[in-house]
Image: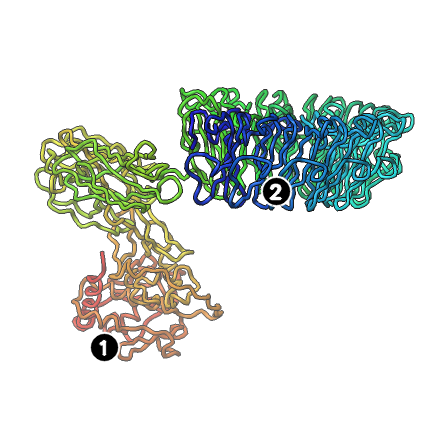
Amino acid sequence: MGASSSDQLGFNSNGNYPSSVTPLANGNYVVTSPQWDNGSIADAGAVTFGNGNTGVVGEISSTNSLVGSHSFDQVGSPVYDDNLSEYISAVTELSNGNYVVTSTYWSDGVEYGLGAVTFGNGTTGISGIVSSSNSLVGTSSSDQLGSAGVTALSNGNYVVSSPNWTNGSLYGAGAVTFGNGTSGVSGNISASNSLIGSSDYDQVGNAGVIALPNGNYVVCSSYWNNGSVNYAGAVTFGNGLTGISGVISSSNSLVGSSDSDEVGAQHYSDYDEGYVSSVTVLSNGNYVISNPNWDNGSVYDAGAVTFGNASTGVTGTISSANSLVGSSDGDKVGTFGVVPLTNGNYVISSPYWTNGSIYGAGAVTFGNGTTGIMGTISSSNSLVGSSNSDYVGLNSYDERPQVTALTNGNYVVSSPEWNNGIDEDAGAVTFGDGNSGVTGAISSANSLVGSNDYDRVGNGGITALKNGNYVVSSYEWSNGIKSSAGAVTFGDGTSGINGVVSAANSLVGTTDYDNVGRPLYNGDQYVSSITALANGNYVVSSPEWNNGFDVDAGAVTFGNGATGISGTISSTNSLVGTTDYDQVGIAGVSALLNGNYVVSSPYWNNGTIVNAGAVTFGSGTTGINGMVSETNSLAGSTYNDAVGRVIYDEIIDQYVSSVTTLYNGNYVVRSPTWDDGTTANAGAVTYGNGTTGVSGEITSSNSRTGLAWNIISPYIVTHDLNNTFYSVFLSDGKVWVDSQGDGYPDLTFDPLSDMTVFENASEQTVNLTGIAAGGFGGNPVSITATSNNQSLIPDPIISYASPNSTGSLQFTPLPDQTGLATITVTVEDGGLDKNLATTFDNNILERTFDITVSNLLEIELRVVETPTSLDSDGAAAILPDHQSVVEEWSSFLLEIWVTTESTSSQGIFTTGLDLQYETEIISATMIEYGPGFALNQSGSINDTLGAVENLYAETTGEGLGIGDYLLFARIQFDSLTDDGVDLDLDGQSIGPYDLGFSVESPEVTVVGDNLTTTQVNTATSTNIYANPYDLNDDDAINFRDLILFASTYGEITSESSSVYAWFSDLNQSNKVEFKDLLYFASNYNKSKAEQHEIVYPNNFPTAWNPPLQVSTLSQIENTTPSLKQIQTDVKLLSAAQDVSSDIARIEQQQLEDIKIVGGGPGETTLGRVTANTIYIDVNGAGSGWSVDATPLDYSEDQYESQLSLIAISSGEAEDLIDLRTVNRLQLDHLQGNDQAASGVIEDTLALGIPRLSEWDEATDDFLFPLRKQVNCFLSDMIV
């Protein structure tokens, strides 16, 4: 702490000063307080060492700080660097963790401004008063030791530059002093400890000290006088372990030999907007010195470039023996410096070099990084121009150097002023091998060239890609008659590209002044329109590209870093704007560290919203094409939001991109002029995922937003070690701390859904999920809940323990109450200080949901065969049983019931609904309302759509439907002509098929104003099965079905090849047999139109599951017609049916045991009986059988007498034996009866004569048990 109000500890009053705190690599730190008063000594200044673990406390004094002892010593005051044109810190950290303090204003009490440079130990610091015993000090007024800074060497040592030091009577001779990085240097400067000048204003070290990678260094003294030669200049090599001392001379330095050679002088670069050193350090540690002002004897400003070894340096006078030199006035060799290549070699740019009589031809020369290059420039050692003002290696527009080092060690030279024959300023870009260089005159054989006047190929610069390839920008290239259409050309970094620029090898514009490849202006300087991505690909920004009639719509195009992209720009290969002056990409492209990229377009118009702005994410592998929109971009939503604009950063005093890239590939977007509703320029900071991006309009839900007009733009501070970033809103006085990994770790709590509960419900539980505190760990969370309707639902109870992600809420509605309550659940965390008690910084998130407490009104559906019995109000105490299966040809009723358990209501008032059903299966034919619903009835049947529509009625009184079931309506359903279900022959299935009953738009109300909820309770669905007797699906059981049935008779169902076998197996016994024939016969001649009852087996339809399919058995060919088993069984059944109504019943088993078997006695015997088996000769004893398919129909016969028939002549039965008559005869024999002498049934039968029964006693005795068997069987069938 300070002791007076003006001490201003740790504060630098000038806003351009660097920070007053210097962190050391070992974790400790140093604080400068140049305004500190040492008692009554004003502005003595102090520099205090702080331990990084324990800090430093107490008042500043000489016991804990390095302090001044005279007024205005200002120990620790920042140093103004003339070369950098800015203030630099007075504390220089050394590479070994120690530090050096510069106090240029320090005095000894007699001489003012002597200056002092003090060594400090990085572990213990230094304290006490500055003096010659602990510091290097000056000896004359205004020596200002260290005024040109302290240079830290890579080995931990350091060098002090004091160009104003006076050497005795030699004013401003200058000195550069070596300091040991472990013990420092102290005392007065002299020739014994410093490199010094020997003339007035030699100003040794004035042009800087350059540290070499190996720990050595180079001192530049451009004003050094070589005897009587003024400003000859010198560059001196210094050993990084011992330094160099003594007077500068040609024996220890490289020196000039003419007035104003100014060897070692910095030169001002318009492009760099500042001075740059004449010494270029190569990647292998050696160095090269550019001296464009050097005179080659009488040749004025010929220029020279000299190679220096990093271990031994270079000394002597510059000449062609140790340097590359020019040979004409104004050659100014090396005027644009030296470009170091990545392999240690280098390239020299001399655009003003004169090629014989060709003025300003220019030359670019390759130099070996181990041995250098010496001699005079020529076409044999350099790439040269061949026309006046070719200016090889120069862009004269802004005097930018045009040599680009590639990442693989090769290089590319741009010469946009090069003349291609008569084509003035056509331009050329030449590839150079990084091991051998390129020499000779530029041509289309060794270069990419323009073919029109002022194409100026390469004028937009060269962009080196990460994979060694490169991209050439030529924004003034003309595409035929289209001026300045612009072109961007991909070049292979191993072999280069030659020839003429065209759409075949370049991405080109197609209209005047598309200016594809033109550099972008970022507010204070131009930057390349080509962005190299981290994965080797690249992106081209063309904000002036015209999209048809849309002027300056702009485009950003992705290019593959291995193959490039060529052709014309369009929405199929580029991200484009769609309105005038969208200028997509005008604010540049930000390359993310994971290879993806982000496009900034602040002037993009969001529909009618001018300059809304957009920032668009692009994949670094495939790019992004199409129109800029809110679906693919982060966008503004009001006029001049200008999302993506270049920002003037007040903190660092320069223009910067609005996109801040994070170390892990993610990014952050600042939008300082974004408006938050009516709050203008509130500003926003938005986190973007580096893999998927961020899109949509900026809102407070996806961004950090300001509270008021931000006078100072929000800025971003990254903290990679903690994986965080800080969004600083100075105008709001707010700092947000967020994650670089996942953005904003906000307080979270999942939304809650509205819910309905019923009157007098028990305790309800609502789960709370997705609960997480904001910030980064250890932040407590509390949850509360309130109700806005205490008379319905009191404040709920919260069950939650921090920091769990889940909890619950419990509530119980008050008895006999209905209504609506809104519940507000508030989740709060401890904020930045992680303390719930300090509420000012707490984060709060509220979720609301509505609870409706209502009367439950229920609708019940029941399918019944007959109407349910009702009381006088149309109610029933219990619901009828629901019929889950109906028959295909049957009619049934659907009853609709309503009920409520609410005792607080006054009963059911209205019911309305729409009913849907499967109209292809059934049809609604009648509507009948319950007795209680007698008022305002409505409803209609729309069988085309399968709907009963607008079914509605009102009750006649109060108290109906409470605790019992009130019939609303009955709907009758019938199977009409167009209804029904077919047998599924392929799928071997008869169903089930759902009738599709569903209720839509149900609404039941009660008498009064109670809140109600209608609930439809459907019983188990009702199914219908196809009628298996109707084998041909014609809605009748007739002869056609019998034919199909007969075709499968006797077959094993699972082995049959017929699709009808499974259906004919009516009792599902896996065989079509006599029992199935009985079932079939019992339904013969029935039809849907006549609404006959159908007799089904007991196991129908439960046993009717599709059988396993087996392979079809091979057909056995039968060439000899014979009697079939089905034919005999049909006749046996016919005989039984003929007498079944007139004979008594016997046990069913007796009938079932009767069999008829083909293959009987043969010859003339028609049949015989044994036990319960009738044997029939299959050929009718050689006469053949008459098998009548309609045995009860005698239309094909004529009567001979009352009891006998004769086959009609020429009919099918003529000359055949009647099988039915034989069956009856054999049945009589089975009972032990003989034929009467004159009976109709005799031992012999005439051909073509069927017989009828003679009703004598013996016949009755026989047929009685048969009739009983048949009747018992029939009575057990399902109707």
- The N terminus, quarter of image: top left
Residue nearest the observer in this picture, 271 or 301: 301
What residue is at 84 percent from the left and 35 percent from the top? 318
Q: Disc 1 residue type? A: Asp
Provide residue 1040's location: percent of width, then percent of height. Answer: 37, 55
Point out the image quarter for the C terminus.
bottom left
Query: In the picture provided, is 683 more to the left or to the right than 558?
Result: left
Residue 283: image quadrant is top right
Query: Mark 1 to mark 2: distance in Å?
Result: 149 Å
Return the disc, 1 or 2, that comes first in the chain's sequence.
2
Please tell me whether mark 2 sits on a helix, a strand or a loop. Answer: loop
Question: Where residue 1278 appears, x then y in whole percent?
Answer: 23, 58
Identify which residue, 345 or 885, lies in the foreground. 345
Report if residue 390 is visible in the image.
no
Residue placed under numbered mark 2 in the picture: 184
- Quadrant of res 1038: bottom left
Mark 1 vs 2: CB contact within 8 A: no
Q: Amino acid at mark 2?
A: Gly
* Whole-percent x, y for residue 819 in the image: 18, 32
**SS class of the residue under badge 1?**
loop
Query: Which residue has dot 1 on it?
Result: 1234
